[in-house]
Image: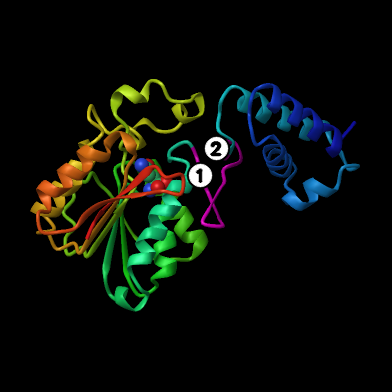
């Protein structure tokens, strides 16, 4: 028999040896998930003995984790905006940078101004953007699109758990016929193909279609602008898109060519890196 305290030590040592930084938190997460207990209990109850079966479950998780499988997929959860979301390998693991994207959007728009407005989240993935927006703006209409069936299933599950109403569409932005959209918010795939190969092992376990922005990183962003022009008839008041430093200049140029009469800006994140393409 082995105790929680002993297995915790073992996990932390192994994670540290494999250069996994957040070893304390990850160990607690693996234990609480495997034992079906909350994190607090996993932190405090060091003398509690675990069964051989539980020990085996933990060891299996640990092995996968050491082989580069992300923790969020192993325990099917990720905290985003202080809330727990369900995730699996069909969706991108929500990032802190995307929290900043949403916060920027919130800083532009009051609750009252969003009443009856249509907001479209393009490439919804786990649905985090739409769900957080719907909670902030309960009287707005949230529409979410993703081309992946698996992603739509995860997003719907999260919306159900959170009890928020969102209209989901399984579609690609280039074939999407949704119109009358007032606000667009998106964390699209924006990595250049040349960067894709050199990503960390863990990121490589995430869906390629959630990251791959084509040769220039702008493939999907360009399609968003085409849809907004041809189908939405340029009705969007604001288009807020996550980007990174590699496409800073090109994405701004592209936005300016589609929106000569709007204010196009690149907004930095807290790490002082270019993160948001803002068209307002
Ligand atoms: N909208 C989701 C997120 O921000 C998924 C984005 C994506 O798959 N590119 O996490």
Give x and y (percent) for residue 97.
44, 47
270 relative to 14, above or below:
below
Q: Is residue 65 left or right of residue 43?
A: left
Residue sitting at the far front: 272
Quarter the C terminus occupies? bottom left
User: Which quadrant of the picture is home to ligand 1?
Assistant: top left
Question: Is label 2 in contact with label 1 (beta carbons under 8 Å)?
Answer: yes
Mark 2 to mark 1: distance in Å? 6 Å
262 relative to 60, above or below:
below
Going 33% across and 34% down the picture, which residue do you hit? 209
Q: Is residue 210 visible?
A: yes
User: Closest to the observer: 202 or 89?
Assistant: 202
Magenta stretch: residue 77 in it? Answer: yes
Badge 1 is on which residue? 87
Give x and y (percent) for residue 253.
16, 42
Residue sitting at the far bottom: 112
Q: Is residue 2 left or right of residue 38?
A: right
Q: Is residue 72 left or right of residue 205?
A: right
Magenta stretch: residue 163 in it? Answer: no
| Magenta segment boundaries in residue numbering | 72-88
Mark 1 packing: few (<14 Cα in 10 Å), some, or many (20+)?
many
Please give the label number shown on residue 9.
Answer: none
Badge 2 is on which residue? 73
């Amino acid at each position: 028999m082995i105790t929680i305290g002993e297995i915790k030590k073992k996990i932390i040592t192994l994670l540290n040896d494999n250069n996994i930084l957040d070893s304390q938190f990850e160990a607690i997460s693996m234990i609480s998930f495997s034992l079906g207990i909350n994190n607090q209990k996993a932190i405090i109850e060091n003398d509690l003995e675990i069964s051989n079966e539980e020990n085996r479950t933990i060891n299996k998780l640990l092995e996968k984790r050491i082989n580069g499988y992300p923790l969020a997929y192993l325990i099917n959860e990720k905290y985003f905006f202080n809330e727990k979301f369900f995730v699996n390998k069909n969706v991108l693991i929500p990032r802190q940078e995307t929290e900043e994207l949403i916060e920027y959007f919130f800083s532009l728009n009051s609750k009252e101004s969003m009443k009856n407005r249509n907001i479209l989240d393009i490439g919804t993935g786990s649905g985090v953007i739409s769900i957080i927006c719907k909670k902030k703006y309960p009287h707005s209409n949230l529409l979410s699109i993703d081309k992946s069936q698996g992603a739509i299933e995860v997003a719907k599950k999260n919306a159900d758990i959170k009890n928020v109403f969102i209209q989901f569409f399984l579609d690609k932005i280039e074939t999407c016929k949704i119109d009358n959209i007032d606000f667009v918010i998106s964390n699209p795939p924006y990595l250049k193909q040349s960067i894709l190969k050199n990503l960390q092992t863990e990121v490589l376990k995430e869906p390629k279609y959630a990251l791959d922005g084509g040769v220039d990183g702008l493939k999907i962003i360009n399609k968003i602008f085409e849809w907004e022009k041809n189908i939405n008839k340029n009705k969007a008041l604001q288009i807020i898109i996550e980007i990174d430093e590699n496409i800073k200049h090109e994405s701004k140029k592209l936005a300016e060519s589609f929106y000569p009469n709007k204010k196009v800006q690149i907004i930095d994140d807290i790490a002082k890196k270019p993160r948001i393409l803002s068209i307002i």
